[in-house]
Image: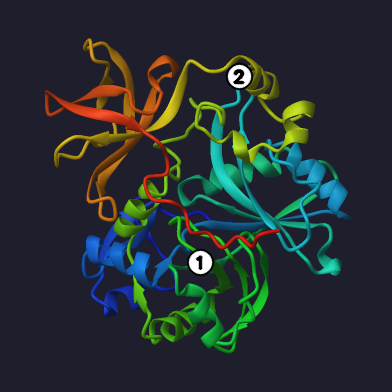
Amino acid sequence: MTSHDDSTPLKTPLYDAHVTLGARMVPFAGYLMPVQYEGIIAEHQHTRAKAGLFDVSHMGQAVLVGPDHATTAAALEALVPADVRDLAPGKQRYSQLLNETGGILDDLMFFRFADPSRDGAIGLVVNAACKAADYAHIAARLPDGVRLDVHDKALLALQGPTAVDVMVRLGAAVADWDFMDVGPVRLAGIDVFASRSGYTGEDGFEISVAADKAAALWAALIADPDVKPIGLGARDSLRLEGGLCLYGHDIDTTTTPVEGGLVWSIQKRRRAEGGFPGAAIVQKQLAEGVGRKRVGIRPAGKAPARDGTEVLNAAGATIGVITSGGFGPTVGGPIAMGYVKSDSAAVGTAVQLMVRGKPIAAEIVALPFVPARFHRTAK
């Protein structure tokens, strides 16, 4: 790992490609990133209809390496509440790094290589703003014989209903992949490592590629008539409609996976056995419930409720706060997520939002706002 002047944003290997395409570049998580090209709504709608291409090279990519899967899995299970041990080769899972009170230090993806020669390796993808802290946290807690290798690679995300067709047209043998499958493929003549996953609620792929091959891969993907470049603005509106958490907003060190509605990411064995940071607190919350919950919220009218907006009950008492909010292009109106007291979290509950000092009517609704279209094979 190398340090840099925090006042000078870094550039991904695709920076020049974004500028050439006329992207509006903004500082984000220490990098200059494209927020939009032709417009957030148009990019959002294109991703829902065909295939959107995102540069997510600011994310952190690393590999835990140990002598065998059991050893490396045990090392990671000491840090996250997910079941790592029983993850099948060639599959990926979502989890969180927790602190001793069950608070979320970051959320991440981890995967197990299918190649038997890499049986002791587990791949990690972590958030850009947290990656330096994540790496230090993980490395300081690894047992002897397990190490953390940080990779300086680019990461692209191809998302949308025709993403799989684009991948196949460019030579990747992924037509029969299921959601959360991972593996090496050859795409546009370039060796990459892909996963059938993403952060939009749509079917799609995340593609790890050597930094010096990223521009060529980007160009090949953009040349497909179904593909358009998509910025961070539409990435945010897509994930919000999908009810997906943004670290630092919807989850952080003050929230646990139970409060955040992420119990599904803690498999049965780990719920029972514990053995991860904050396990006693998480297990107590699983057994007894929590005082607040993450919920979906639909404001009435057209005014969006941004993060930090107070949520009030019908009597005018504060019961929570918005953590993510904006306009949902697919929904056709403002949408938000936030935390409210558990006794006010039932779907259909009427609430009020204090927007610019005025109360606006809203309602607690089910998440996600737009049903996910991940590719899951019936088994």
Measuring 61% from the left and 70% from the top, which residue is drawn there? 194
Q: Earlier in the sequence, mark 2 or mark 1?
A: 1
Observer-nearest of 30 and 242: 242
Residue 364 in view of the camera: yes
Q: Amino acid at mark 2?
A: Gln
Q: Does 210 sit above or below residue 72?
A: below
Residue 8, position in %: x, y?
35, 56
Secondary structure type for disc 1: strand
Measuring 68% from the left and 28% from the top, which residue is drawn there? 277
Residue assigned mark 1: 204
Secondary structure type for disc 2: helix
Residue assigned mark 2: 285
How far, Cα to Cα, is label 2 from label 1?
34 Å
- Answer left or right for 162 relative to 205: left
Observer-nearest of 221 and 27: 221
Determine which quarter of the picture holds residue 107: top right
Q: Check disc 2: other Cα within 10 Å, few if <14, some if 14-19, many if 20+.
A: some
Residue 142 in view of the camera: no
Q: Does 267 sit above or below residue 256?
A: below
Residue 187, position in %: x, y?
57, 83
Q: Work out which quarter of the rendered image holds the C terminus and state it.
A: bottom right
- Res 254 label: none
Residue 3, position in %: x, y?
51, 54
Measuring 36% from the left and 54% from the top, which residue is drawn there? 238
Observer-nearest of 223 and 142: 223
Q: Amino acid at mark 1?
A: Gly
- Answer left or right for 233 relative to 140: left
Q: Check disc 1: other Cα within 10 Å, few if <14, some if 14-19, many if 20+.
A: many
Measuring 31% from the left and 58% from the top, which residue is drawn there? 234
Determine which quarter of the picture holds residue 4: bottom left
Q: Work out which quarter of the rendered image holds the N terminus and state it.
A: bottom right
Residue 161, position in %: x, y?
44, 69
